[in-house]
Amino acid sequence: MILACKQIQKAFGINTILDNVTFHVEEREKAAIVGVNGAGKTTLFKILTGEMGADKGEIYLKKEASLAYLAQNQQIDTEKTIWQEMMTVFEKIYQEEQNLREMENKMSNLSGKDLSDHIKKYAQAQQNFEHNDNYGYESRIKGVLKGLGFLEEDYNLPVYQLSGGQKTRVYLSKLLLSKPDILLLDEPTNHLDISSIQWLEDFLKGYQGTVLLISHDRYFLDKIVTKVIEIENKKSSVYEGNYTFYSKQKEINRQIQQKAYEVQQKEIKHQEDVIKTLRAFNREKSIKRAESREKALERMEKVEKPENLPTKMRLRLTPKITSGNDVLKAENLKKSFDTLQLFQNVNFDIKRGEKVAIIGPNGVGKSTLFKILLGKVRQDAGEIKIGTNVHIGYYDQEQQELEESKTIFQEIADAYPTMESGKIRNILAAFVFTGDDIYKTISSLSGGEKGRISLAKIMLSNANLLMLDEPTNHLDMYSKEILEDAINCYEGTVIYISHDRYFINRTAQKVLELTSTGVNQYLGNYQYYLEKKQEQEQNNKTETKQVTYIVSEGKADWLKQKEQQAQERKAAAKVNKVEQEIEQTETKIKELDTMLFEIHADFSKAQELFEQKTQLEEQLEQLYQKWEELQ
């Protein structure tokens, strides 16, 4: 065990946030803290780091275990470049490397016993340096920065000039490179695209330390964690499994608890009836028996009634106006900003009722494509065709047009003054605003709740084509499920941009992968997209001529595709050859180190070996540079 909490309590004034939170995490274990927004997850992290004190309870941290914490919006105010900031992690290694260079330079000025002693010290320092795998720190920096979405031309950017999301990624890079015993990560995927999230998944799965993370990315959790710690109603429950296991087991546990509650309530009612009858006899013995049963009832450990969960959406949301079958068509769209080309040859066709996800790396132009489709930005080339009776509703969580002083009910009623109160209540109930909830003011709502109100307004409008830009951003898991149900029950057409793979899996019927050279179309959900991508990669590797099942909407020439595949195979062969040369060179250097250590008394031989070793190290540095360029 490396970390544990026992009966942690925390309150702010009269508002209790955490009460009796208890769990433990083993060394190298990957665990998640889950719960709705406001449940106290981030507060718990701050208690674990010592940033905030608990009112009661105990924290256990293994002696000398190092702990690092990534907050949701990590700010770094420094004039250092990204690369310089990464180098701060390896200051000790860098200094050791400089010491080795100084020792090498000093050798030319020594002779006799002084040279012999110096070579011995140098050989020992060299062995220690290599044993700790310190030569590859620059490659590790580049690997992490690339994995988290930074380009090589970004390395010299001053950190203070970066956006909030980029600063968070810089800080995450530093944490991963520093390799603490315990990583606390609060929403680490918030500013990452799908490829970077997949890289982070692989990194964390192979991480030798312990990882405790907060995330609303259900797909991410499924891939990484083997334990889920849920905070609900201020208390904690532990589930040994990934997110899917937790979700299913929680429902089973709830059903068991509901049954136990009903059985106990039935028994209590029976005992109360017996007590009432015994007292009605009004005899000494019957009264004593009644009192005995009353005491037994008081001592009975009561089963808590599970909270009533809102029913899943059953209301089918039908647009007032039905569009034609051809909703939206893009032909050869192209867009650049100055010398930066975002995309070209973008072609796709959307039909009525389709649920379409647009994916792609950060910076490829997904939001720009949306703005072009909405007429807010002009394309450089190409044509957009909007179908008959198509009315577009645009949803962007960063641009919600809600009146903070109004209640939820007023917000909808004022937007649709002719709508009956009953229909407004039904719509709000579909988005899980029931009872007195509809009289809450907009200002009192969470980001996820405001998002649900905005979506409800759009679905009540004349829109029959919803265009949603990152609709799950900042939503907790519960709000995401409501949004998924809303989209699946919507009879209009939906196009959305998302990095949430679980959300795409549950809602998409078609996936459009935007690249700089066009759009690749996959006729299924995210899992289907993954399968077809893997098939395509396998086909490329085995050099088969099978159909790849991927429909390329870009008008790329077949011969050009085959030429590109051949180039990729040649590049892979070059990488493999360089890797073999690196391995052979490192082996030779280690052999020379051993020989230097053993024959330090033979000055001339030692000098000869040292010169050979120096040449090999220069070759190794060149090979590493070549490998990085090929990569």
Image (cartoon, rainbow, N blue to C red):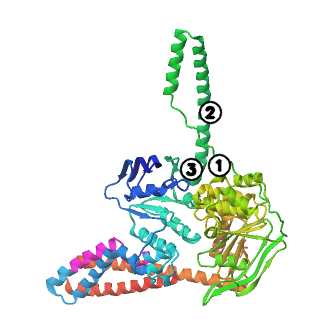
- Residue 260 placement: quadrant: top right
The residue drawn where x is 61% and y is 38% is 258
Q: Nearer the viewer, residue 424 or 114?
A: 424
Q: Which SS does the magenta portion mostly show? A: helix
Q: Nearer the viewer, residue 98 or 371?
A: 371
- Residue 333 placement: quadrant: bottom right
Residue that carries the numbered disc 1 in the rendered image:
436
User: Does 391 appear above or below 27?
Assistant: below
The type of residue carrying mark 2 is Glu
Residue that carries the numbered disc 2 in the rendered image:
262
Near mark 1 (Cα within 10 A), the count class, few <14, some 14-19 or many ≥20, is few
- Residue 482 placement: quadrant: bottom right
Sequence-first disc among 1 and 2:
2
Near mark 3 (Cα within 10 A), the count class, few <14, some 14-19 or many ≥20, is many
The type of residue carrying mark 1 is Asp
Label 2 to label 3: alpha-carbon separation: 24 Å
SS of the residue at dot 3? Answer: helix
Give percent across and percent down for residue 11: 44, 50
Q: Nearer the viewer, residue 124 or 75?
A: 75
Q: Which residues are magenta?
A: 119-140
Q: Nearer the viewer, mark 2 or mark 3?
A: 2
The residue drawn where x is 49% and y is 54% is 40
Residue that carries the numbered disc 3 in the rendered image:
246
Give percent across and percent down for residue 187: 51, 63
